[in-house]
Amino acid sequence: MRGVAARVLWCGKVLQGSDFRLLVAAAYLHDIGYAPQLVDTGLHALDGARFLRRMGFPDRLCALIAHHSCAMGEARLRGLSSQLAEWVDEQTPLRDALWWADMTTGPDGGMISVHGRIAEIQERYGPGDLVTSSIRQAEPELLAAVERTEARLRAAGVEVR
């Protein structure tokens, strides 16, 4: 198993029970809003969360999807802040772990450093793209979530690479 969902398995050492199960579900579903038939606003995190809500998924899962990897910055640049505010960014270890998994997994599903991932996103979208601008603005918050998660993992005896 590779990719974001594989990375979160390490988090079973720091998240227990329903939080861990929710993290696994969020890892599998976090980018569902990229599916062409689901694109509405152009903000994949928001489009994915709205789809999952329509399908009856729990609000907390929808909120994790809506806010994954600092989507608030992109929402602000797209004029969608009020729409994203339908869900609360819970700012918990679970949320940090989802961001960590997303920001340390490359497009090919392999492991990548958070700095490498941020650079990859900027290169993929190009210098003038809105996504590039939002990822640059989000970098301090993304780095902090990754650092907090890696500290939790190390404290639980997980060797973080």
Image (cartoon, grey):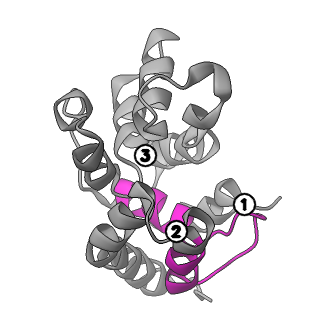
Q: Report the Cα–Cα distance between label 1 and label 3.
A: 19 Å
Q: Identify the residue position indicated by label 3 in the image.
A: 19
Crowding at dot 1, Cα within 10 Å, few <14 / some 14-19 / many 20+, comes out as some
- Which of the image's four quarters has the N terminus? bottom right
Q: Report the Cα–Cα distance between label 2 and label 3.
A: 19 Å
Q: Earlier in the sequence, mark 2 or mark 3?
A: 3
Q: Which mark is residue 103?
A: 2
Front label number (2 vs 3): 2
The residue nearer to you, when weighing 118 against 148, is 118
Question: Looking at the picture, which amino acid does disc 1 mark?
Answer: Gly
Q: Report the Cα–Cα distance between label 2 and label 1.
A: 11 Å
The residue nearer to you, when weighing 142 against 78, is 78
Q: 78 above or below 103?
A: above
Q: Residue at x 79, y 62 (%)?
A: 2
- Which of the image's four quarters has the C terminus? bottom right
Relative placement, left or right, of 53 versus 123 is: left
Q: Position of residue 13 (x, y in %)?
A: 53, 68
SS for dot 3: helix
Q: Check residue 108 for magenta coloring.
A: yes
> Can I make out residue 13 in this image?
no
Q: Residue at x 42, y 33 (%)?
A: 61
Main SS of the magenta segment? helix
Q: Which residues make up the magenta segment? A: 94-120
Q: Identify the residue position indicated by label 1 in the image.
A: 3
Q: Earlier in the sequence, mark 2 or mark 1?
A: 1
